[in-house]
Amino acid sequence: MSKTIKVALAGAGAFGIKHLDGIQKIDGVEVVSLISRDLEKTLQIAAQYGIGHVTTQLEDSLALKEVDAVILCTPTQMHAAQSIACLKAGKHVQVEIPLADTLQGAQDVAALAKTSGLVAMCGHTRRFNPSHQYVHQEIAAGRFNIQQMDVQTYFFRRSNMNALGQARSWTDHLLWHHAAHTVDLFAYQCGSPIVKANAMQGPIHPVLGIAMDMSIQLKAANGAICTLSLSFNNDGPLGTFFRYIGDTATYLARYDDLFNGKDEKIDVSQVDVSMNGIELQDREFFAAIREGREPNSSVANVLPCYQVLHDLAQQLNAG
């Protein structure tokens, strides 16, 4: 594909804006349709980014012949059904993490993607952050092997707000959304499947209906272990912080930035063409479309993560 890739983006919230900003830096790609539930706000964002078509219904955008691909930044509960709708409409699709909030939903998307001939990708951004790419390259070169990963995913979200401090129309989830990043990254970086997983959760919030604190333990087939702590109650630095403890080094990854075990910054500016993980994720999506290949973090590649999340959900429900 040599022509401009024309994109519809669904979900003009905090993460949708990050994609719009990233796509502006990618040649040969144009966002031609913007979908979100609040028409007035969506019109304002569309005007800011020069997007001509605005709607509150995904089906309207899928009906546009010029649309080649769709990026879904919509509520978690919609991801599987909307991904399937995009594929059935003949559109390449990148769905933000998580692929689904059930194993069956993830499997349904994967089954259709396999037979569609289309690029179907899930936004497992940690695979693309320069910090984690650097560690991945060290592992691939045989210079570093993970013994343990210690991960903290902390937010202060006692009310239903997004990353911009705006009210959400849906409820986020520590397991199916935030833990998905680490579960996938641990297996990906180890190059070894997860063979053991345990989870505990704190009290269920009386209004939001979700656990606000969670603890997860993972073990890979090669013996590496991972400890993941998640909280929506943490009133402090927000985000996800990864400590890689290995046989030759210790690394601390904070989104796109990387530090050694003494908290000295490591230059990762030459790891890839950008220091923006979201932009790099989008570049991979569009490159896969142009080259007719499977992308890194394809639906098929990330499916094992959702089996682990399902198993953990079963444990938590039984408890």
Image: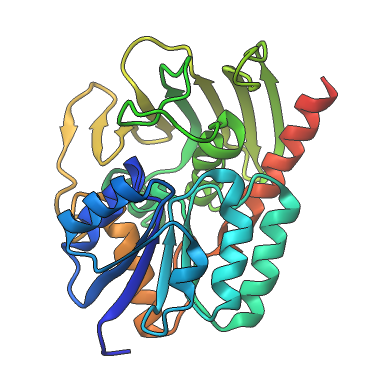
Q: Image quadrant for the C terminus? A: top right
Horizontal placement of 299 versus 7: left or right? right
Query: Considering only vertical position in the picture, is 111 above or below 150?
Result: below
Q: In terms of image quadrants, where is residue 111?
A: bottom right
Expressed as whole percent of the image width and height from the top left, the position of residue 241 reads 37, 28
Quarter of image, res 244 = top left
Side of 184 relative to 167 (left or right):
right
Question: In front here: 61 or 157?
Answer: 61
Q: How is the image coloured?
A: rainbow
The percent position of residue 13, horizontal first and vertical second, equals 35, 43
Q: Position of residue 80 (x, y in %)?
A: 62, 57
| Residue found 26% across the figure and 41% down from its top | 256
Against 286, residue 21 (above or below) is above
What residue occupies the far right of the structure in this picture? 318
Nearer the observer, 42 or 181:
42
Q: Residue at x 25, y 82 (%)?
A: 4
Figure disc tally = 0
Q: Residue at x 69, y 25 (%)?
A: 199
Q: Position of residue 197 (x, y in %)?
A: 70, 33
Q: Which residue is at the far bottom?
A: 2
Residue 232 in the figure: left or right of residue 27: right
Work out which quarter of the rendered image holds the N terminus and state it.
Answer: bottom left
Q: Nearer the viewer, residue 117 or 162?
A: 162
Residue 200 lies in what quarter of the image? top right
Q: Is residue 193 visible?
A: no
Res 126 visible:
yes
The residue closer to the viewer here, 222 or 176, is 176
Residue 2 sits above or below residue 168 on the image: below
Using the image, determine if residue 64 lies above or below residue 260. below
